Amino acid sequence: DNRTRGDGRAVECSGLENRRARKRPGGSNPPLPARYEFRRAASVARRHPPEGATMVAVIVILVTVVVVVACIMLYNGIVQKRNRVDNAWQNIDANLQRRNDLIPNLVEAVKGYAKHESGTFEAVTEARAAVAAAPDPQAAMEASDMLTGALRQLFAVAEGYPDLKASANFINLQQQLDETENRIVYARQSYNDCVYLYNTAIQTFPGNLVAGVGHFTAKDGFNVADDSVRD
């Protein structure tokens, strides 16, 4: 194809000139296919997300972090309360063992003056063995209540023997047993307080949700069941 300039010379239009002619200002470029337009719009959206969407994402992340931290704090708090319950029981158990260690010497001291009180001695011995063989804390405390009652009967027997009451060995044993009994009473109350706090933590919202996931179960406190101990 040839065309003529103003000076009469013909110039061949190359393919490059044709392409430039299609891109001249004021010319109309052919539209892109729809799929390319969609991809370009998505790419722009990823590079420049809307301000509202960014704020929503930040809020979701913050709420998630707060919930996770709260759950961790609740779980750790329940574990600490459960550990306090276990520690309180260990304190009781140590005093029960201390009392059991004192009883044989006490029984031997009383036997020297009241050999005919075999029934009282047997009751003390059996109750002491029950405390030592208890399979769990509840059974140990029930046996301990029985032992406390049997010891009171033993001290009642000793009241009838002035020489026994005046014995330095008997007086020392009695003082140590009284001190140990007081420790057991105090430790029992401390245990019950720890159990109350622990049970409250796992039975009230939102701790009950964490307790269900962590398989925390309620614990029983100690009640004085033996009437002789209540007196």
Image (cartoon, helix red, strand yellow):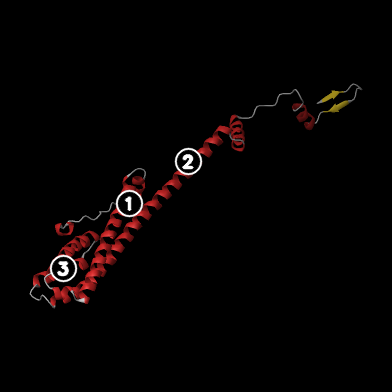
Q: Amino acid at mark 1?
A: Tyr
Image quarter for residue 88?
Answer: bottom left
Quick one: 121 or 136, which is closer to the camera? 121
**Residue at mark 3 to residue at mark 1: CA–CA distance:** 38 Å
Does 181 sit left or right of 155 as displayed? right
Residue visible at 58% across and 33% down in the picture:
51
Q: Which residue is mark 3?
A: 155
In the picture shown, does residue 204 fall above or below 12?
below
Provide the secondary structure element on which disc 3 rests. Answer: helix
In the picture shown, does residue 108 fall above or below 209?
below
Q: Which residue is mark 1?
A: 198
Residue visible at 21% across and 68% down in the picture:
132
Q: Amino acid at mark 2?
A: Val
**Residue at mark 3 to residue at mark 2: CA–CA distance:** 66 Å
**Which x, y percent locates residue 158?**
14, 71
Does 37 sit left or right of 79 as displayed? right
Q: Amino acid at mark 3?
A: Phe
In the picture shown, does residue 88 fall above or below 50?
below
Q: Which residue is mark 2?
A: 63
